Amino acid sequence: DAKTTQPTSMDCAEGRAANLPCNHSTISGNEYVYWYRQIHSQGPQYIIHGLKNNETNEMASLIITEDRKSSTLILPHATLRDTAVYYCIVRVITGTASKLTFGTGTRLQVTL
Amino acid sequence: DAGITQSPRHKVTETGTPVTLRCHQTENHRYMYWYRQDPGHGLRLIHYSYGVKDTDKGEVSDGYSVSRSKTEDFLLTLESATSSQTSVYFCAISEPRTSGSLYTQYFGPGTRLTVL
């Protein structure tokens, strides 16, 4: 699986867009990019995933560069409840294997 | 909410005692997982199951065993608890319907275990 690099921490003002970058320069063609977050003391929460195209759901947008070497998770209007650790994970699909490896993530602090 | 519950939510036990944690799901998901989370280590996979009686080891399986005798329950057992097993334990489920959703996992609320 490709290694990912994320900033350790970021700040964002409430109501503004939060843009969380992830570098995965060694990604291969059959690897998906997944984003999860973990709010303090809770279990991780799935946000979004993508392969090549940009994706959007009710929680966030995922922008993947054309060369797929990096991606950005966008929370369009951050609120205080979005304060959490955000994990970018790259995973190859290998039949029944479905193990996730979480790194240290980006700690996003949303402030007033 | 993927219908996942964990019990107990908190437990304090003594070194050398057996401990069983239960993960229960109500939606017939095929895959179930046990992770532990410790400061400085993030989440690490202990064991996972891909069906009734079908289980496999994760990256930190030593000292743990699992059982899945029915779809809805996945049990994690510490045969003889040690202080190094003090941690927060999370259960997760997934039900891959497309290749891309294979790693879409939904997590339970966690069990905080303290081994004295």
Image (cartoon, helix red, strand yellow):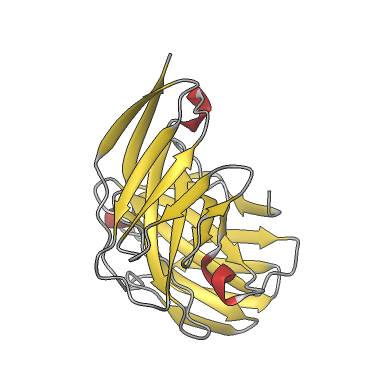
- Foreground residue, B31 or B54? B31
- Foreground residue, B99 or A102? B99
Give above or below for B6 relative to B67. above
- Among all residues in the image, which is located at the extreme right? B27
Classify the position of the C terminus of chain A by image quarter: top left
* Residue B79 visible, this angle: no
- Foreground residue, B55 or A39? A39
Give above or below for B10 relative to A111. below
Is B89 on the left-hand or right-hand side of A102? right
Snapshot quadrant of residue B112:
top left
Q: Point out residue A49 in the picture as x, y percentages from the top left corner.
A: 51, 59
Q: Point out residue B4 in the picture as x, y percentages from the top left corner.
A: 66, 54
Identify the residue shown where x is 55% and y is 76%. Answer: B49
Snapshot quadrant of residue A68:
bottom left
Identify the residue shown where x is 32% and y is 74%. Answer: A1
Identify the residue shown where x is 42% and y is 66%. Answer: A100
